Image (cartoon, rainbow, N blue to C red):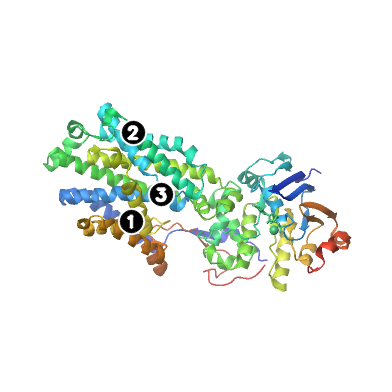
Amino acid sequence: MSAPASSAWRVETRTRAATGFSVFAVLLVAIAFAAPFFVSRSLLQDLFLILTMLVLAQNWNLLAGYAGLVSVGQQAFVGFGAYAMFACVSLGGLDPILAVLIAGVAAAMLSVATGFFVFRLQGAYFAIGTWVVAEVVRLVLAQWRALGGGTGTSLPNAAIRDMAAVQWIAEAFSVRSAQAADILTYWLALILCCATIGFIYWLLRTRQGLGLSAVRDNQEAARSVGVDARRIKWAVYVSVAFVTGMAGALIYVQKARISPDAAFSVVDWTAYVIFIVVIGGIGTLEGPIIGVIVFFLLQKTLADYGSWYLLVLGLIGIAIMLFAPRGLWGLFSDRTGIQFFPVRRILKGGPSTDHQGTRGGPHG
Amino acid sequence: MQPVLDISAVNKRFGALTVADAVTFSLAPGEALGIIGPNGAGKSTLFNLITGNLQVDGGRIVFDGTDVTNAPPMQRCLMGIGRTFQIPQPFVKLTVFENLLVAGTFGSRKLEAEVAARCGDILIQTGLIGRANVPAGQLSLLERKRLELARALATNPKVLLLDEIAGGLTEGECAALVGTIRDIHASGISIIWIEHVLHALNSVVERLLVLDFGKVIGMGRPNDIMASKAVREIYLGLDV
Ligand SMILES: Nc1ncnc2c1ncn2[C@@H]1O[C@H](COP(=O)(O)OP(=O)(O)O)[C@@H](O)[C@H]1O
Ligand SMILES: [Mg+2]
């Protein structure tokens, strides 16, 4: 038994790749903010789609990849957030931007209410439960006559035109208000995306994030070392609903037209999102970023092939699950050891000189 | 002196199978108690009842003067019950050090920075320091068992429950393990140790409890217990 030399220990999380990446990331975000100055309107709409899908994917990844809550009913929060925004704007006359925030709160409240039901279910039953909840919410909102019932409705043109900052952007870029609204929603999507990734990265580096990773790996053992697994899962479930609701609302500010079938589409808001996370690499922050790019490229290439498109997506998803269960990012990261968002706590220093991790270590 | 752990008339059934039948005993502060008994006697189940991973059907569990019969595992850990699992349950994607860090920061409600050094010290004490930054999923079975011990220690327990951590070790490794457990015991931690490797067990514990079909069929000093008829019958054929 060696004498402890407590003061000599150090814990590090930073890696050189990550430091390099953070410089690159800041540049990338700066360019992305400036994009409306030099890209076409249709490209801006594509980027909006990528950013909002990435927000949904990062949230599903946090939910399923970290908290182990495999939900197939996140469209409940997309749709509920979208409808909450429509209600605030069309019926309440609020500014759409403010309505997006309220939509997040509404979705979080829905998650608290439905959480008591789905949290009683385990594994596959949890997944089915979340889907059932989404269907019920869709059926209920389809009865809402004031918002078009089953056929849906559109946002009033004036609401978009009078949206905060739209006139200002229209003048600054000398474009019409519809295009100015696209620029504004794009910027909001960019902010939401950066905030989401920043929040999740921050969370994973905190004590609670460590607890969350332990729950993901082994809930029973986590409970036995003092982790409140239930509270952590609830917190993740509700915050994911909050952000998912805001993303849903923002998507429908941009679309400006809603119907229950579209807003609660399990294919658009859950199946695609799961595909993005799985091909990119579940349980990593990098995975969904890679995934959303691959997804978008596939969508562009296969757009003309109709239903073949879904089939090809499905086949690719299955192939990756079979041959690269940790996704494309996992494939890359396993080979190179590179991580752009390092969360590992690496122990250094101490009385022993060699603990790089290949030696068996002394016994006893 | 008030016992640190007091088990009274604890019952547990799995369907028709009784795995704890009016189990009653107490553990004095600083005591080391061994539990022996054939496979399937209900030893591991008894640990799960003490830690709250399983609920009792009847009876009472008092820890440090507080009734914890219905407390969740998390709360019992915070109060000072640390445990190992017979089948190791590591956090596979976390490193060995991070496994301890979780236990340290949550098990004693402190910041990561406050417990990191102690976790490092425990890694040295348990011989895992060479594997500190390796994902726990890459450990061998023996290393996983050592990790169970290290992680339980990191929660800063008053009572440490050890479930068959000496099986499969070479003689030298076993002696080293006994040394480690003696040190832990000497630092004032009470221990309950389930073990089939009797010579290792008997060189540490002050009392032995014999469990068979969920019933306590003997309790006393190791020498007296090993000489008793009941134990000889049960262990006939087992390596004594
Ligand atoms: N969760 C469970 N459900 C049903 N039966 C169980 C469960 N856990 C253990 N058992 C059964 O209870 C008996 C006692 O198991 P255990 O406490 O693990 O025994 P020991 O640790 O003494 O070998 C065994 O017959 C085992 O199969
Ligand atoms: Mg057992």
Distance from the alpha carbon under mark 1 to that under mark 2: 32 Å
Where residue A49 sits: x, y (%)?
26, 49
Residue A289: mark in rendering: 1
Distance from the alpha carbon under mark 3 to that under mark 2: 31 Å
Residue B202: mark in rendering: none
Question: Mark 2 — on which chain does it sit?
Answer: A
Q: Residues within 10 Å of mark 1 (few under 14, many from 20)?
A: many
Which residue position holds label 3?
A200
Where residue B123 sits: x, y (%)?
61, 62
Using the rendered image, report if marks 1 and 2 lie on a common chain: yes
**For marks 1 and 2 on the same chain, the one whose residue lies earlier in the sequence:** 2
Question: Mark 1 — on which chain does it sit?
Answer: A
Decide if ligand 1 comes within 8 Å of the CB at mark 1.
no
Give the residue displayed 40% in from the left and 67% down from the top: A323
Q: Residues within 10 Å of mark 3 (few under 14, many from 20)?
A: some
- Most extreme residue toward the front is B16
Name the element at disc 3.
helix
Quick check: A329 above or below A59?
A: below
Splitting the image into 4 quarters, where does residue A186 fall?
A: top left
Distance from the alpha carbon under mark 3 to that under mark 1: 13 Å
Which residue position holds label 2?
A141
